[in-house]
Image: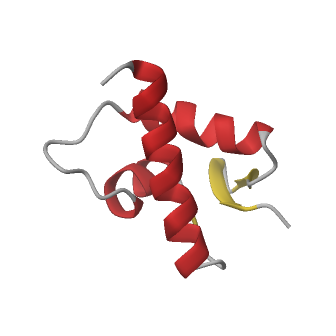
């Protein structure tokens, strides 16, 4: 799978997670581990970050800085 396709696939997983749990918020690491249904071993967290950034640019998610960490959640 090409990188762009992989990022789009991961973005789709994040969209599905938020559609089922719209109040969810988590760190990059939490999203990478818990929100994405990896069919095999997880990809690099950089793929999840790229998907989150793509969704942020599309206005789907937003990044909130809390306690020295970035949390990602559905855009409001």
Image location (x, y in percent) of residue 58: 78, 43
How is the protein colored in the picture?
Answer: secondary structure
Image location (x, y in percent) of residue 11: 53, 46
In-front residue for pair 54/66: 54
* Residue 58 visible in the shown view: yes
In-front residue for pair 19/44: 19
Image location (x, y in percent) of residue 65: 74, 50
Say which residue appears at 81% left-offset and 49% top-offset. 59
Q: Is residue 46 left or right of residue 56?
A: left
Say which residue appears at 66% left-offset and 48% top-offset. 68
Position of residue 48 relative to residue 61, above or below, is above
Residue furthest left as drawn:
40
Q: How many marks?
A: 0
Q: In the rendered view of the protein, which quadrant contains the C terminus?
A: bottom right
Q: In the rendered view of the protein, which quadrant contains the N terminus?
A: top left
Say which residue appears at 18% left-offset and 50% top-offset. 39
Image location (x, y in percent) of residue 13: 45, 56
Residue furthest top as drawn:
2
Position of residue 20 relative to residue 13, above or below, is below
Q: Quadrant of residue 19?
A: bottom right
Q: Is residue 6 left or right of residue 70?
A: left
Say which residue appears at 53% left-offset and 80% top-offset. 20
* Residue 26 visible in the shown view: no
In-front residue for pair 32/8: 8
């Amino acid at each position: 799978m090409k990188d762009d396709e992989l990022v789009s696939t991961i973005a789709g997983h994040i969209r599905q997670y938020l559609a089922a749990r719209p109040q969810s918020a988590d760190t990059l690491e939490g999203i990478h581990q818990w929100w994405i249904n990896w069919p095999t071993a997880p990809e690099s967290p950089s793929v999840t970050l790229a998907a989150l950034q793509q969704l942020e640019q599309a206005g789907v998610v937003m990044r909130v800085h809390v306690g020295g960490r970035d949390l990602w959640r559905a855009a409001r």
